[in-house]
Image: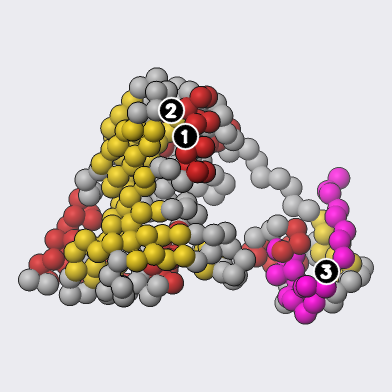
Amino acid sequence: MPEIRTLPVPDGLEGERLDAALARMFGFSRTKAAELAGTGKVLVDGREAGKSDRVTAGAWLEVEMPAPPAPVRVVAEPVPGMTVVYDDDHVVVVDKPVGVAAHPSPGWSGPTVVGGLAAAGYAISTSGAAERQGVVHRLDVGTSGLMAVAKSERAYTLLKQQFRERTVDKRYHALVQGHPDPLSGTIDAPVGRHPVHDYKWAVVADGKPSVTHYDLVEAFRAASLLDIKLETGRTHQIRVHMSAHRHPCVGDLTYGADPTLARRLGLDRQWLHAVRLGFEHPEDGRWVEFESDYPEDLRQALDTVRADSA
């Protein structure tokens, strides 16, 4: 039998659209809320309502909860182009190519770091959710560069603690459109789910605290190469912050980049690369640090921008 949940609309959601109210009250994505409201699985005071109908404080919402998603399995599959830059009994550091997810997730059928390590015979920590065991931080599918995965339970616990306490040195290089003002600075703006598009993130008042530090590396006629240090690690944080700052990553069409420039540079993803990763080794506390060169597509795009500015 389906689970039915019934809740009254709180005063703070008076006048909101039904799909927005459902998302806030039940934790659905906006898309999932709209789907439920449009299939008769949501009643307002006993009557079916449309997703755009406005709700009244105190009205009772009766919702047929969606079935939980099927478990996601880790598929051991070699990942071409993924290299191991460090490996011991406690941690493995990989250089992740573009087009590879950190771990399996609903809707993603492509290669993953976890699956690639499994295919290569690496035994990683069993801590964390089944599909992301050992993963202590992630990179977007469209972002390349360095990523650490815990191999022991102790390493998982201590690395997660370092990420929570913000003692890890995570550095990225980003080629952004235009020239930020000031050329070096800090963006401190909360990041959360986009209010309309649930596949995107945005600077929103009720988002989680998010801090990005950036410094100019090189300026070009149409773009700037930035060194970026993350103080926090929100999903899409760099992409969201730079877009909100009106300087999206070159090639990042999701967050407002110029498609003409992306085509001219031969880019089909955002120009964003995790160039450096440093942390205290979970076994003996010594500081370890790793660096990654730009992959070919980013290097060629950078060479073109540099030549155009000569």
Asked which quadrant contains residue 9, the reply is bottom right
Residue at x 58% of width, y 38% of height: 72
Residue 41 in the image: state x and y as whole percent: 81, 61
Name the residue carrying label 1. 159
- Gap in Å between the C-alphas at discs 2 and 3? 46 Å
Labels 1 and 2 touching (C-beta < 8 A): yes
Q: Which mark is residue 103?
A: none
91 vs 201, nearest the viewer: 91
The amino acid type, in three-letter code, at marker 1 is Leu
Name the outermost residue toward the left. Answer: 310
First along the sequence among labels 3 and 1:
3
Residue 187 in the image: state x and y as whole percent: 42, 66
Residue at x 89% of width, y 71% of height: 58
Name the residue carrying label 3. 10
Residue at x 47% of width, y 34% of height: 159
| In this picture, residue 221 sits left or right of residue 72 | left
Q: Which-is-in-front pick, marks 3 and 1?
A: 1
Is 242 in the magenta? no
Numbered label tally = 3
Tell me the SS state at disc 1. Answer: helix
Labels 2 and 3 touching (C-beta < 8 A): no
The amino acid type, in three-letter code, at marker 2 is Pro
Question: Is residue 6 something that shows in the picture?
Answer: yes
Name the residue carrying label 2. 282
Which region is colored magenta? 1-23
| In this picture, residue 158 sits left or right of residue 32 | left
- Residue count near mark 2 (Cα–Cα under 10 Å), binned few <14, some 14–19, many ≥20: some
Residue 135 in the image: state x and y as whole percent: 48, 36
